[in-house]
């Protein structure tokens, strides 16, 4: 029979028998049960919304209260409620595709003013080259608090939206700070909070206050403001955390600077020999940029070292290439929040449980997504299994085991990619393997690219990432497409005297689907003008340029000039023998050490700032073309500033069958890859 207190209120305690026939009790929520959630961040709000929605479906009327200590504007007392968070939440503010899907599932549509930027590219920056990954799912950046100071509508942010959504769902909001917890005589929990002479008597309490109630290197319960948790949860130990450094940059109020980094998340796995960093995230947010640093130099430093570390970081060559030259540090927005790297011990007790990153979080990625997943799971446990310790153990147990395994595997994943991406040789092999796969395989079959996407975006768990990393086809791609081709290309560079100077090494390989579409267009044009229906040799290379069209066009016109600074390999002499730069009718001679491979190019068509089209006149290539094309670089359907994509297309038919099989086509790839990177450095 259910037990009651002296007033006759039903506690919802029912007697059951387990499989061994022994009597056990479960404590269930019932009509009028009161749930208090400490903390109004994502974990607390997700839990509150899920509890209220599930209880309505179950026909149980419960009272859910959120106690949030951060400064709130309007305090949720208006109709409709407005709960604007007026402080910071120490977070990078990136919402992964998984989190965006979860919000859609909950029918929580983000208002446009909250979305600071939509990701279109993830740039994985390694020691050798940058690998850019297209973002094919929703992935946005937000602010979770009111900083940096000066933002328009800064008090209405992601946390404000979630808290407001919870209030609309029926949550009662108290803007205060919990100071103590203790059990009452009837087994429920008393909560004391500031500026109140009354306590709240709760049937169930969820702590969602996070690990940054006090920022630092540890969460020693004896020194932490939430030490009261140990009073009511026997054996509770907070998760391991790691110190981070987060700071804000601001861009000048002009479209070119903002557009340069707009929509591009950067994920970097190395600093320098003197600045030991393991992970760097750069998150664009309109005219602002959030930077997150993790690594040994942060672990060992104190707050007094922040500016020194930031200044050294901003001087790193691979970092300077990311930002516009006029980026400014907002020194008022620097913090050292904790980042959860482990799993709490015994995060539940009778009528109480912990959610959010004080319980655990996905290692280094998608903390908000973890908050949603855990809160959704606990809401189901609380309503369907019970709020006693035994019932909560059955719900928390799988979560604890899953995240322990996942984060252990995550450490192995990040160790592997740090070793690979922080070393010139290893990162070149991995880069080459990814580019080879991209050129030879359709998007949905690219295993290496998918692995990098899952690591950088937080789209998948580390267990699946590890399994995919050791797939036989992935290993073969790294051995053949990476190691073998890297060795072959390196020997080719030595043969032709190509040296990588101070210019940046950029991606020039073109994905298979883009190459095939361009080939189709080229063949249609050649079919109409010259009756050519196929090409034996076809190659395409592209590189992004941040310079005016006219400047790119002018530099391309020097192709064949003695004083040009690009495409000057050993054994190959490219000389203009007649005509003028970028004027149709001019002829460029390719003199190659093997005379049988020498040939002439005639400039047939030149459209200033857009196109330079050469045709092969004689030699081993019949019906061939060399075409330079300057296209507008489009990001998020917007074209702003001097951002262009320079593409080179080469195609011809061999004059003999022997040449077709003996021609070293890979040498062509090496020469133009190097030359395009040179050209970009010269132009920019």
Image (cartoon, rainbow, N blue to C red):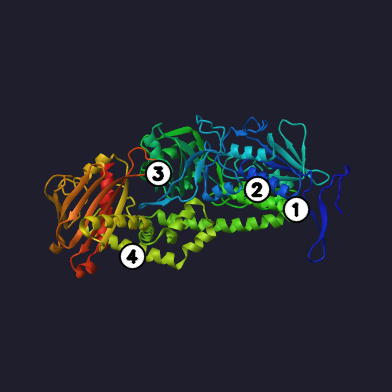
Q: Is residue 294 above or below residue 494?
A: above
Report x, y in % for residue 580: 13, 44
Among numbered discs 3 and 2, the one appearing first in the sequence: 2
Q: Which mark is residue 355?
A: 2
Residue 64 numbered tag: none
Tell whether label 3 touches label 1 (CB within 8 Å).
Answer: no
Which residue is located at x 41 percent, y 47 percent?
A: 271
Question: Label 3 belongs to which residue?
Answer: 635
From the image, tell me which residue sits under label 1. 386
Secondary structure, mark 2, is loop
Q: What x and y, as percent, mark residue 642?
A: 32, 39
Q: Mark 3 vs mark 4: which is more N-terminal?
A: 4
Q: Select label 3 or label 2 by which is in front.
A: 3
99 and 408: which one is in front?
Answer: 99
Q: Earlier in the sequence, mark 1 or mark 2?
A: 2
The secondary element bearing badge 1 is classed as loop
Q: Quadrant of the N terminus?
A: bottom right
Of marks 1 and 3, which one's residue comes earlier in the chain? 1
In percent of width and height, residue 122 lies at 43, 49
Callout 4 secondary element: helix
- Locate residue 526 relative to residue 401 in the image: left or right: left
Mark 4 touches mark 1? (CB < 8 Å): no
- Tell me, for residue 484, which label it has, or none: 4
Q: Is residue 187 above or below residue 21?
A: above
């Amino acid at each position: 029979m259910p037990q009651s207190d002296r007033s006759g209120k039903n506690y919802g305690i029912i007697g059951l028998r387990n499989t061994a026939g022994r009597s056990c009790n479960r404590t269930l929520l019932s009509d009028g049960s009161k749930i208090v959630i400490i903390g109004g961040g994502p974990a607390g709000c997700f839990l509150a919304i899920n509890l209220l929605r599930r209880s309505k479906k179950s026909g149980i009327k419960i009272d859910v209260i959120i106690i949030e200590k951060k400064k709130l504007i309007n305090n949720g007392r208006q109709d409709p409620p407005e709960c604007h968070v007026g402080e910071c939440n120490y977070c990078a503010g990136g919402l992964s595709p998984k989190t965006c899907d979860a919000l859609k599932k909950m029918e929580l549509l983000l208002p446009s003013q909250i979305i600071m930027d939509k990701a279109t590219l993830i740039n994985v920056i390694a020691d050798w080259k940058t690998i850019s990954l297209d973002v094919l799912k929703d992935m946005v950046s937000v602010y979770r608090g009111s900083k940096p100071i000066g933002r328009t509508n800064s008090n209405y942010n992601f946390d404000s939206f979630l808290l407001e959504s919870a209030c609309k769902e029926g949550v009662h909001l108290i803007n205060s700070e919990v100071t103590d917890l203790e059990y009452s005589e009837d087994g429920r929990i008393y909560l004391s909070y500031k500026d109140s002479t009354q306590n709240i008597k709760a049937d169930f309490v969820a702590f969602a206050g996070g690990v940054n109630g006090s920022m630092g290197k540890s969460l020693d319960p004896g020194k932490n403001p939430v030490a009261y948790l140990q009073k009511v949860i026997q054996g509770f130990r907070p998760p391991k955390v790691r110190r981070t450094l987060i700071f804000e940059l601001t861009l000048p109020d002009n479209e070119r600077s903002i557009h340069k980094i707009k929509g591009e998340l950067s994920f970097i796995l190395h600093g320098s020999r003197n600045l030991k960093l393991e992970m760097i995230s750069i998150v664009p947010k309109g005219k602002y940029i959030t930077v997150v640093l993790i690594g040994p130099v942060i672990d060992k430093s104190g707050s007094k070292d922040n500016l020194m570390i930031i200044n050294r970081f901003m001087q790193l060559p691979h970092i300077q290439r990311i930002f516009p030259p006029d980026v400014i540090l907002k020194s008022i927005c620097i913090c050292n929040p904790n980042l959860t790297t482990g799993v709490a011990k015994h995060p539940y007790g009778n009528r109480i449980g912990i959610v959010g990153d004080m319980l655990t979080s996905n290692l280094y990625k998608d903390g908000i997504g973890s908050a949603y997943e855990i809160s959704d799971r606990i809401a189901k446990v609380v309503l369907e299994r019970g709020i006693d310790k035994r019932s909560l153990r059955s719900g928390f147990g799988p979560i604890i085991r899953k995240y322990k395994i996942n984060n252990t595997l995550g450490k192995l994943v990040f160790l592997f990619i740090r070793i690979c991406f922080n070393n010139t040789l290893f990162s070149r092999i991995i880069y080459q393997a990814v580019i080879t796969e991209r050129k030879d395989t359709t998007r949905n079959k690219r295993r290496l690219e998918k692995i990098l996407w899952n690591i950088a975006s937080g789209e998948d768990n580390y267990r699946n990432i590890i399994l995919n990393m050791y797939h036989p086809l992935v290993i073969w791609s790294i051995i053949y497409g990476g190691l073998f081709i890297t060795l072959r290309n390196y020997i080719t560079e030595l043969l032709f005297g190509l040296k990588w100077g101070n210019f940046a090494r950029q991606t020039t390989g073109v994905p298979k689907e883009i190459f095939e579409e361009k080939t189709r267009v080229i063949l249609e044009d050649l079919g109409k003008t010259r009756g050519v229906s196929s090409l034996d040799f076809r190659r395409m290379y592209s590189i992004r340029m941040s310079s005016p069209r006219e400047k790119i066009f002018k530099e391309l016109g020097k192709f064949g000039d003695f004083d040009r600074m690009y495409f000057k390999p050993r054994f190959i002499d490219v000389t203009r023998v007649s005509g003028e730069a970028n004027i149709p009718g001019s002829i460029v001679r390719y003199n190659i050490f093997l005379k049988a491979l020498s040939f002439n190019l005639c400039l047939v068509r030149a459209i200033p700032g857009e196109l330079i089209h050469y045709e092969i006149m004689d030699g081993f290539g019949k019906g061939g073309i060399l075409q330079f094309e300057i296209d507008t670089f489009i990001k998020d359907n917007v074209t702003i500033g001097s951002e262009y994509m320079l593409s080179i297309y080469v195609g011809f038919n061999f004059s003999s069958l022997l040449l077709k099989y003996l021609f070293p086509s890979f040498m062509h790839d090496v020469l133009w890859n190097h030359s395009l990177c040179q050209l970009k450095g010269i132009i920019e």
